Image (cartoon, rainbow, N blue to C red):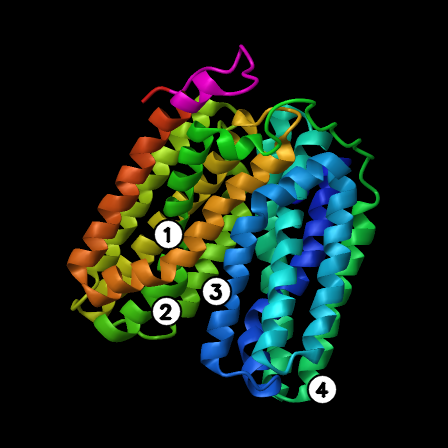
Amino acid sequence: MRLLPEPGPARTLTLGTLVRTVGRGLWLVASALFLTRSAGLSATEVGLGLTVAALVGLLASAPAGYLADRLGPRATQIVALVASGVLTTALLAVGSLPAFLAVGAATAIADAADRGAKGALIAGSVPADQRVRTRAYLRATTNVGISVGAVLAGFAIAADTRAAYEALILTAAVTYLLAAAVFTRLPYLPPVPAPAHGPRLVALRDRPFLAFTVLDGLMSMHFGLLNIALPLWIVGHTRAPAWLISGLMLVNTVVVVLFQVRAARGTESLAGAARAARRAGLAIAAACVLFAASGGRSTGVAVALLVGGALAHVVGELWHSAAGWGISFGLAPEDAHGQYQGAYSMGYELGKMVAPVVVTTLAVGWGVPGWLLLGALFLSLGAMVPGVVGWAARNRFAAPAADPVPVS
């Protein structure tokens, strides 16, 4: 299995993604500590700021993608990365909630532009049959970059000084600027003219596509299982050692890096992608059952069930991600990839907003019945995708005749 895609735009996208996700990893790991221990915000203020930023990012997704279509995806991507670098540096001036809200909201808009432009860049610079494979490379690369950034952030956390946090933030800002420089090597993609008549944000009027976006977004709540619910479950409801939490996270990262490209095979068509979404729901449901069964068991049995659940979950994660890429690319008109990718990302932002409440209430608050209810939810969501995609394929703006309608 190749570690990098073939030379050309896909490899440039991969290298740029690696550089910027190192910076993302730096910030993700140390952000809460910097904001509370160095910037002087309370934990409640940090939570409020992040919630507001997530809401802004959700609302800005489709308009930012529309902007990428109108200005050209490469130009939008580069501007968004430069803006992210500048805004990351601006965090050094944050010392109050209003300042954090302002920087966070602006950063969320830049991130939304980045997401829409990335999808349009892939669609415009990579052959149609290689788009999903390229997204798979980018996701594997993202996991590598974030892991490297997380390790580097450990030095700032260990020092726990203002100077260390400032160095971390400036390093993260530089990675965004370097990534922008890498993306200048991509081929120029001309802007798509705005339609002379009719609505501008056609993605937000495409009801079948929005239905899929909601389903996919709710399915993405499964990321909260591993990051939020499972650590609390392991510590509070099982006899498994606490260090297993880090071990399961590591297993997830390694599997994604090694197998995401392979798992994306067959999802280039709508039919294949829809079937992958259904399999994803089944695998994640199985993971929920295994996690539920680990409660109250002996240490050895609990560890075995938790590892098995984590493996089932990451298999579902691989299929879910690949299915989303195949469907979002396959249903988008060729002149509106930016806004369709932006609209598609709204689902993920929605899932990210509701996951903490849903997964903690059900899995941790309700215990075994909650885990089983979550499993039934993910199974149902995956099962509904083929029908919704079939509906969308019959009503899409520009349907390639050779692309088969998914079967249920």
Q: Say whether disc 3 or disc 1 marks the residue closer to the N-terminus.
A: 3
| Separation of marks 2 and 3 at Cα, in angstroms | 29 Å
Give the answer, above or below, for where 110 lies relative to 161. above
| Separation of marks 3 and 1 at Cα, in angstroms | 19 Å
Left or right of residue 331: residue 137: right
* Residue 119 in the image, given as x and y percentages of width and height: 63, 38
Answer with the quarter of the image where residue 41 lies: bottom right
What is the three-letter code of the residue carrying label 1? His
Q: Which mark is residue 244?
A: 2
Q: Say whether disc 2 or disc 4 marks the residue closer to the N-terminus.
A: 4
Residue at image coords 28%, 68%: 233
Is the C-beta separation of discs 2 and 4 under 8 Å?
A: no
Which stretch appears magenta? 391-406
Q: Main secondary structure of the magenta part?
A: loop
Left or right of residue 190: residue 296: left
Q: Judge the density around disc 1: few (<14), some (14-19), many (≥20) Cα neighbours within 10 Å.
A: many
What is the three-letter code of the residue carrying label 4? Ala
**Residue placed under numbered mark 3 in the picture:** 51
Q: Tell me the mark number nearer the camera, choosing from 3 and 1.
A: 3
**Residue placed under numbered mark 1 in the picture:** 222
Q: Nearer the viewer, residue 29 or 61?
A: 61
**Residue placed under numbered mark 4 in the picture:** 163
SS at circle 4: helix
* Residue 380 in the image, given as x and y percentages of width and height: 26, 38
| Separation of marks 2 and 1 at Cα, in angstroms | 19 Å
Q: Judge the density around disc 3: few (<14), some (14-19), many (≥20) Cα neighbours within 10 Å.
A: some
What is the three-letter code of the residue carrying label 3? Thr
Is the C-beta separation of discs 3 and 4 under 8 Å?
A: no
